[in-house]
Image (cartoon, rainbow, N blue to C red):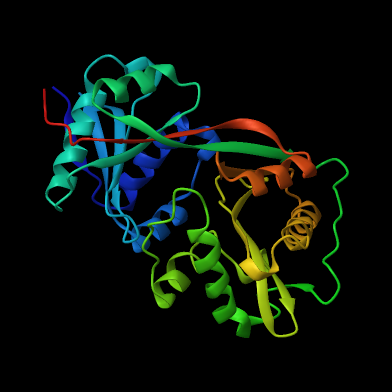
Amino acid sequence: MAEIRPTRDDAERELWLELRNAILPDDAISLDNLRSWMTAAEQVHLLAYDGDELAAVGIAMQEPWHTEPRVRPLVPPQNRRLGLGSAVLAELSRWCASRGAGALLSHVELGDEESLGFAERRGFAEIGRELQVALDLTGELLVLDPPPGVEIVTWAERPELVGGLFEVHAEGTLDIPGNEALELEPFEDWLEHDMSGSGDRPEWTFVAVAGDEVVGYSKWSMTSAQPTVAHHDLTAVRRAWRGRGIAGALKSAQLAWAKEHGYTRAVTNNEERNAPIRRLNERFGYRPAGGLILMRGPLVTPA
């Protein structure tokens, strides 16, 4: 029987991260990133030991903008089919139930049929997909200028624009397919969790301004665990300003900055139904690089 318990300190979180990143190398994160996650959402990180061996890990988090918690048991291929995934998922479910959850959200990597079958056998069903695309930054990049009257600056250059950034965030986030019923965080929480974490910097946030009005922005989310990979965060334009080429100009400025600063690859995930941003990424030359199947299912009790 596996021993399953939560991490208790940074040393154990480092062990948790080591196995998590080995299982998900393309989504590797640092301890600083994990600490930022912990300020944004209540969560638990589970260690599953088989004897002295750390054989599996798991995570559950209750984000304030979702009514249902997200969970994910992670078992390396060599340790699967030993009951570890089921045991970890049951412990994650127990943690979620203690916080009043009646259902769970999770996700599975596209192409991981074994994990998909595991989830489906436990009552999980697909509710959406996020398609990942990547761009090689070592080649020539498409250059798109902003429309007349619009300038691209960084938030570091214009810190007073933060209120306008939040207004763009609110419109853009709710317009992403699947987010229609999302409960947005208040301004101060958004500023702390979305804009001031370990992977966020004002100089990595690009703002489209028309005079003193923020009409759009795009930002990177970086991790020291992937020092040459630039990860896109939100790209959003005010509804009244869409269709004028602002998103393309923002992305162009972002990519030029990333290349200049030594990044060799840019990666982003787009909701499958978000056709405008997917078309824009295709124009820049992004290519398919996997993705996630988003799933919803019941709490799982021990076998």
**Can you say which quadrant of the picture contains the N terminus?**
top left
Q: Nearer the viewer, residue 133 or 81?
A: 133
Report the residue at 76% width, 56% height from top.
Answer: 248
Q: Is residue 52 visible?
A: no
**On the rendered structure, is 167 left or right of 12?**
right
Which of the 4 quarters of the picture holds residue 108? top left
Q: Vertically, is 78 above or below 45? A: above
**Can you say which quadrant of the picture contains the C terminus?**
top left
Q: Nearer the viewer, residue 71 or 183?
A: 183
Q: Vertically, is 231 above or below 46? A: below
Which of the 4 quarters of the picture holds residue 105? top left
Q: Is residue 157 visible?
A: yes
Report the residue at 38% width, 45% height from top.
Answer: 14
Q: Position of residue 188 (x, y in %)?
A: 41, 77
Q: Position of residue 82 (x, y in %)?
A: 24, 15
Q: Position of residue 244 (x, y in %)?
A: 77, 63
Q: Position of residue 151 (x, y in %)?
A: 79, 74
**How many numbered marks, from 0 up?**
0
**On the rendered structure, is 143 left or right of 276?**
right
Q: Vertically, is 179 above or below 285? A: below
**On the rendered structure, is 100 left or right of 32?**
left
Report the residue at 58% width, 46% height from top.
Answer: 274
Report the residue at 23% width, 50% height from top.
Answer: 8
**On the rendered structure, is 220 left or right of 301?**
right
Q: Nearer the viewer, residue 158 or 184?
A: 184
Which of the 4 quarters of the picture holds residue 241? bottom right
